[in-house]
Image (cartoon, rainbow, N blue to C red):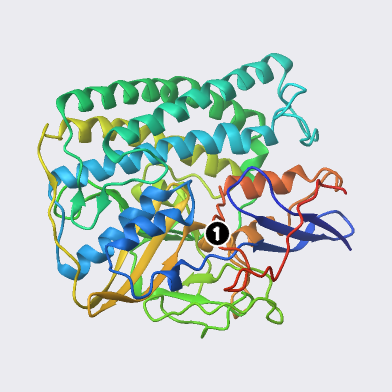
Amino acid sequence: MSTIKLDPVTRLEGHLKVEVTLDANNAVASATVAGMLFRDFENMLLSRPPRDAAFLTQRICGVCPVPQAVASSKAVEKITGFKPNLQGLMLRNLIQGANFLDSGITHFYHLSLLDYIQGPQMSPWTGGYTQDLRFSAADTQTLTNHYLSALQIRRKANEMAAIFSGKLPHAANIVPGGVTALPSATEITNFRNYLNDIQSFISSTYQSDVNMLASAYSDYYNVGTGYGNLITFGVFDTNTSGGLLFPAGTVTGGTVGTFNEANIKEYNKYSYYSSPSGQAPASGTTTASYGKSGAYTWLKSPRYNNTPFEAGPLARVWVSGDYRNGVSVMDRHMARYVEMAKLVSNMQTWLDQLTPGASGFTNIGDPASGSASGLTEAPRGAIGHWLSVSSSKISKYQIITPTCWNASPMDDSGNPGPVEKALIGTQVADPAQPVELLRIVHSFDPCTGCSVHVMSPDGVEMSKFVVQPLGK
């Protein structure tokens, strides 16, 4: 058997390492996926006022800070039994939706497309694999031009969100109690102008490009299939009665099922933690143990009914009934487009529901005690915050991010994580240019962002990660 190590996997947030072994026919026989950075927000938050968490957890990464703020705020609100008014919910939808639009455009054009085209022979396009490139020179030029256009669309998405949220990446006004912004009529008009430009790009350019990709690489509907289990916590309130644009649910064997939070547990036999394994997140703790025997990642293994589940746009559109074709690399790309088209259309409706000058915020203070979860969705999947409060201070905090679902290691029963499972069985045409592996990994849109490296309290470096060009 031979081994391929991709370390780090580029074009994603954070440091992700992928290692596979190939059999005699160059098919992946086994795979490990590792998040190589340590996130310790769970312990940093202890003894802080609960409202602080909405601001601090956004610093986990700059890619999906808004869902972190929403999840944290929802947890505090749940303890107090409070639900923001419609103005507050619509403002959150619009800010979170803008974050989704930016992330979706980024994922297709700037993180994934370069696995399928060879751009101009200059930075940042040079240095990629040249294996299995199927587009004509003319189509390649078209996609390269759209790669550049998409940069402008991403900028507009972030500027659009900033109208109601303050300068991104970290939203300043999503707090327990709603959103503190008071949108003016001018701001609503400005937001709509941005939204119209983005909607036009999605309905024309993005749609044709993703269809072009699916046509040229139709065999990728059978690559990276994995378990086929999908999970979503649900996202985007449509009213104050609990309606969601993308409802919570699960998919097992193609069948949609209900979601029950009580079925979630986290395992860490193969993770750098000495905390008890197999705990519900509300009871879980985070105790780092770098170098633990047998462990290979900082990610834990969240499981639903003790089974690996994949999170992300495909889960959301499958449960909502907007797209039900299969589970594969190309299905993940098609699902993201379907979701984007539906989202941008509904954002127009939510914008219509805003009242200029009206408040979407109620000061609910900090709860004195209690426990609750805040569940929502980041662009790349289900995100949950589990909060306990005692004497008006945080006594316990646990976070499960989308990449913890997708890029998790083996659980205590030896079941590989969803990305690991999707890699197993993949045929690699040229082990020197394993582009098939990158296409699978990127289709999940992994994000392993964190902000704390392995370091002692007095600042002494305990471990050093050297990032080298591939093949060196």
What residue is shown at x 12% (from left), y 49% (from top)?
A: 85
Q: Residue 265: in sight, yes or no?
A: yes
Q: Secondary structure at mark 1?
A: helix
Nearest the viewer among 342 and 82 is 82
Of all residues, the one furthest to the front in this rendering is 458
The residue under label 1 is 406
Residue 324 x %, y %: 45, 45
What residue is shown at x 15% (from left), y 35% (from top)?
A: 354
Of all residues, the one furthest to the top in this rendering is 138
Above or below, 380 against 227 in this view is: above
Work out which quarter of the rendered image holds the N terminus and state it. bottom right
Residue 240 x %, y %: 14, 51
Residue 328 x %, y %: 58, 48
Going by the numbered disc 1, the residue's amino acid type is Asn
Image quadrant assignment for residue 168: top left
- Could you tell whether 27 is left or right of 346 in the image? right
What residue is shown at x 37% (from left), y 20% (from top)?
A: 197
- Could you tell whether 278 is left or right of 239 in the image? right
Nearest the viewer among 286 and 260 is 286
How many numbered markers are drawn?
Answer: 1
- Could you tell whether 362 is left or right of 246 in the image? left
Q: Residue 232: in sight, yes or no?
A: no
Residue 47 x %, y %: 34, 75
